[in-house]
């Protein structure tokens, strides 16, 4: 799943390709406005908040998208292969020959720009935004100190932009078992580390989602994807717990039992869900 740094980088790529350009022909192919034509609209800007992307047009409307597990955006000067066209959920052909394709985008909502707050008010502070508030993120995470660390960090209403990769890597870097209570660690320090890691990943060339500082094959992550392999720090075998179906707070989780001593995975899944993903259209 794309994380906050992924969506931030996507916004910059789309910005470079299309801001200020006019849509010669384009349409939405899913959502409540499926079939709507966007011909003649000019793309004003892109903005991201956590995993959510907002494309703003000159008519005062916004396209809100969330990629979830499968969505993507492509920028091309040629048509997509015919076999891929059925997966397109929106298309913007611009005045300089570039086309933007939203492929398999599961959340695609078109609404007045003034309604963006309906998404934002359910999201926590985003370290990659100009209005980042570390103290507020710390306060939100501290409201439930007994909550498992990975569940608390995955909850987008606490801190927006952390996905499964980052919460597992942050737990390792802080030396806390992923299922230990968030209150057992220095929450402010976790927030500070999360902000620095996302900032580096989003903006430093060659460091996208590299958590170890080593870009060598198989050495970019401390624990994620390393089940059954030796810890890069101590050599202990990395363990993994499977995700719980329909529980966004219990995705696949990795840890080093020596570097992150603590508890066993909880028997019951956390009933909390992440922040809502949609912006109601009017």
Image: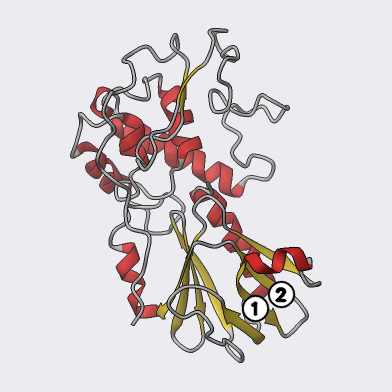
| Above or below: residue 238 compared with residue 15 | above
Q: Residue drawn 57% across and 57% down?
A: 71
Give the percent coordinates (x, y) of residue 95.
Answer: 72, 85
Give the percent coordinates (x, y) of residue 25.
Answer: 66, 86
| Above or below: residue 238 compared with residue 94 | above
| Above or below: residue 35 compared with residue 64 | below
* In the image, farthest residue toward the right: 78
Helix, strand, or loop for circle 1?
A: strand
Q: Which residue is mark 1?
A: 92
Front position in the image: 109 or 85:
85
In the picture, the disc for residue 99 is 2
| Above or below: residue 31 compared with residue 143 | below
Helix, strand, or loop for circle 2?
A: strand
Front position in the image: 200 or 209:
209
Q: Residues within 10 Å of mark 1 (few under 14, many from 20)?
A: many
Q: Left or right: where does residue 28 sit relative to residue 244?
A: right
Q: Left or right: where does residue 103 sit relative to residue 181?
A: right
Give the percent coordinates (x, y) of residue 198.
Answer: 50, 43
> Number of labelled discs?
2
Front position in the image: 280 or 9:
280
Q: Are marks 1 and 2 in contact (CB under 8 Å)?
A: yes
């Amino acid at each position: 799943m794309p994380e906050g740094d992924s969506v931030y980088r996507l916004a910059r790529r789309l910005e470079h390709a299309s801001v200020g350009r006019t849509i010669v022909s384009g349409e939405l192919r899913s959502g409540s406005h499926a079939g709507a034509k966007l011909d003649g609209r000019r793309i004003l800007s892109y903005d991201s908040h956590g995993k959510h992307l907002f494309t703003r047009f000159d008519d005062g409307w916004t396209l809100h998208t969330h990629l979830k597990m499968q969505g993507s955006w492509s920028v091309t000067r040629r048509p997509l292969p015919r076999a891929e066209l059925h997966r397109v959920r929106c298309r913007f052909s611009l005045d300089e020959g570039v086309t933007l394709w939203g492929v398999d985008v599961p959340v695609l909502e078109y609404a007045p720009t003034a309604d963006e707050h309906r998404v934002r008010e359910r999201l926590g502070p985003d370290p990659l935004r100009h209005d980042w508030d570390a103290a507020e993120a710390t306060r939100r995470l501290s409201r439930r100190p007994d909550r498992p660390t990975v569940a608390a960090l995955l909850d987008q209403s606490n801190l927006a932009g952390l996905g499964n990769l980052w919460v597992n890597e942050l737990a390792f870097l802080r030396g806390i078992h992923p299922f230990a209570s968030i209150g057992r660690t220095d929450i402010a320090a976790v927030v500070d580390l999360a902000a620095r890691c996302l900032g580096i990943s989003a903006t430093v060339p060659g460091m996208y989602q590299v958590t170890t500082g080593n870009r060598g094959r198989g050495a970019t992550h401390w624990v994620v994807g390393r089940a059954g392999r030796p810890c890069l720090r101590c050599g202990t075998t990395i363990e993994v717990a499977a995700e719980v179906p329909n529980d966004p707070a219990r995705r696949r989780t990795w840890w080093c039992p020596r570097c992150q001593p603590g508890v066993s995975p909880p028997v019951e899944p956390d009933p909390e869900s992440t922040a809502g993903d949609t912006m109601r259209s009017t």
